[in-house]
């Protein structure tokens, strides 16, 4: 009788769980249909974007001089090497006379000019940042970082890039200037969608002594948002789980990041993995991955390590399987309900992310400056790890039904693929651990009844 009652309770609990999951999936699908028509939307960073601001600082006889500032307002998504690439189309027949702090990749056809030759005559110029160490007279404030821009949540002072451009054959007043159009931002690959340029109130500047305000003659903004669906058809990272209460290690799903590189991968114990030059990146950034069943460049492992009376501890490890890429100023974002009460983080820096004031369940981990903020290429040093101590909320804490594992994981701003919920490590004593165990029990009982018949 007790077994029947327990099974009945378990079945009812399963029904409620499945109903709740169906409602949740329906809600997510509805939101996706609504949001997919927009440029992009990240629920963990709803206000994240890159804003490109053009400030006209002075008029010239045939155009204007503008300061272009690129501000990364994304909390945990930065632009890594080889850096950003910005392009646009001129509205008329404008040319770029000169640039400071950046350069165009092509000059174009300037044969109609005599004497002074413009820096770029292309209808659609493509601009890149200058490399560190360029001569002082070519530098501009917040330039020359090879196009690398930090995330706003990680380092606000390094989340800006800027350059100056002198434009000719253009309007020479607020009424005659035509705004550039068709902006495209690569950071460094695809994923960003830019809206049209919009005139906004002129930017106000403070003098060095902060006693006088000046303002731009004209200002327009361009807003670019990121979509992982546009950046890559497959995930770029995966997650594995383990725990102290179960010997089972839940691995990343097979081919979690697609198996298109399976034929060109390198075995970890092969001679090729120690070959000279294996870490040299290609111009097209083609990865060279270590052979794994998941074929992901990055794996995040979450281990439930210890359960104390008032606290519990988890270990987090990030492993790089790409021989041709290291990750500078990497970020790891985790969503878990107990992140509202983090006691201590060891070896990583940590910052809570609260996109919605009433919910505090998301946090960003990142490396300590000059200690482990660089995740090396695949190999013996291609990993970083830390531990997190969390205080329990006795009303919500549980080791049952995978509660101790993250709901979402992002690495460098891209969402990682989690294992299926029915494969999570479960408590051995749990009679109703996961739906798969219920289904297995039901199948076994059915076979017994059929054999008796």
Image (cartoon, grey):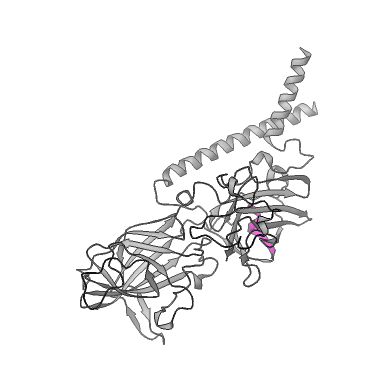
Q: Quadrant of the C terminus?
A: top right
Tell which of 396 and 407 is nearer to you: 407
| Magenta segment | 336-344
Tell which of 13 and 362 is nearer to you: 362
Residue at 50% across, 72% down: 158
Q: Position of residue 160 (x, y in %)?
A: 45, 70
Q: Position of residue 321 (x, y in %)?
A: 63, 55
Question: In the rendered image, which quarter is residue 316 located in?
Answer: bottom right
With 25 as the anchor, is 139 left or right in this view? left
Q: Quadrant of the N terminus?
A: top right
Is residue 339 a member of the stretch shown in magenta? Answer: yes
Question: In the rendered image, which quarter is residue 256 located in?
Answer: top right
With 395 as the anchor, is 327 left or right in this view? left
Q: Is residue 5 above or below residue 121?
A: above
Q: Position of residue 374 (x, y in %)?
A: 61, 66
Question: In the rendered image, which quarter is residue 134 located in?
Answer: bottom left
Number of callouts: 0
With 156 as the anchor, is 173 left or right in this view? left
Q: Position of residue 70 (x, y in %)?
A: 41, 68
Q: Is residue 270 above or below residue 87?
A: above
Q: Residue furthest top?
A: 453
Tell which of 105 and 404 is nearer to you: 105
Is residue 26 a member of the stretch shown in magenta? Answer: no
């Amino acid at each position: 009788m007790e077994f029947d009652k327990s099974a009945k309770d378990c079945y009812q609990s399963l029904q409620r769980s499945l109903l709740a999951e169906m409602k949740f999936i329906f809600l997510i699908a509805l939101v996706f249909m609504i949001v997919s028509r927009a440029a992009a939307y990240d629920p963990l960073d709803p206000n994240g974007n890159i804003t490109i601001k053009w400030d006209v600082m002075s008029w010239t006889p045939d155009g204007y001089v503008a300061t272009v500032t690129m501000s990364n307002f994304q909390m945990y998504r930065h632009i890594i090497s080889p850096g950003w690439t910005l392009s646009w189309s001129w509205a008329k027949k404008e040319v770029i006379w000169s640039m400071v702090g950046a350069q165009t990749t092509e000059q174009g056809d300037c044969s109609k000019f005599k004497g002074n030759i413009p820096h770029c005559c292309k209808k659609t110029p493509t601009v890149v940042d200058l490399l560190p160490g360029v001569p002082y007279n070519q530098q501009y404030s917040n330039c020359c970082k090879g196009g690398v821009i930090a995330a706003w949540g990680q380092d606000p002072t390094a989340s800006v890039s800027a350059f100056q451009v002198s434009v000719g054959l253009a309007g020479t007043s607020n009424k005659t200037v035509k705004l550039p159009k068709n902006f495209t931002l690569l950071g460094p690959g695809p994923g960003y969608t830019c809206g049209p340029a919009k005139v906004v109130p002129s930017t106000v500047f403070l003098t060095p002594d902060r006693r006088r305000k000046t303002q731009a003659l004209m200002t327009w903004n361009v807003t670019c948002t990121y979509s992982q669906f546009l950046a890559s058809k497959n995930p770029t990272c995966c997650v594995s789980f383990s725990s102290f209460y179960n010997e089972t290690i839940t691995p990343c799903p097979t081919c979690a990041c697609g198996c298109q590189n399976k034929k060109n991968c390198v075995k970890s114990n092969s001679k090729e993995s120690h070959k000279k030059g294996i870490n040299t990146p290609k111009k097209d950034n083609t990865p060279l991955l270590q052979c794994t069943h998941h074929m992901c460049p990055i794996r995040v492992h979450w281990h439930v390590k210890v359960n104390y009376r008032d606290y519990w501890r988890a270990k987090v490890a990030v492993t790089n399987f790409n021989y041709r890429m290291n990750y500078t100023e990497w970020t790891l974002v985790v969503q878990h309900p107990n992140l509202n009460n983090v006691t201590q983080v060891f070896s990583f820096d940590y910052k809570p992310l609260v996109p919605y004031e009433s919910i505090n369940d998301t946090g960003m981990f990142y490396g300590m400056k000059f200690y482990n903020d660089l995740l090396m290429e695949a190999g013996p040093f291609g990993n970083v790890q830390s531990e997190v101590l969390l205080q329990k909320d006795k009303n919500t804490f549980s080791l049952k039904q995978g509660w101790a594992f993250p709901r979402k994981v992002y690495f460098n701003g891209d969402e990682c693929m989690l294992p299926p919920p029915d494969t999570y490590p479960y408590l051995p004593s749990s009679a109703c651990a996961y739906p798969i165990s219920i289904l297995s029990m039901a199948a076994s009982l059915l076979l017994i009844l059929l054999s008796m018949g």
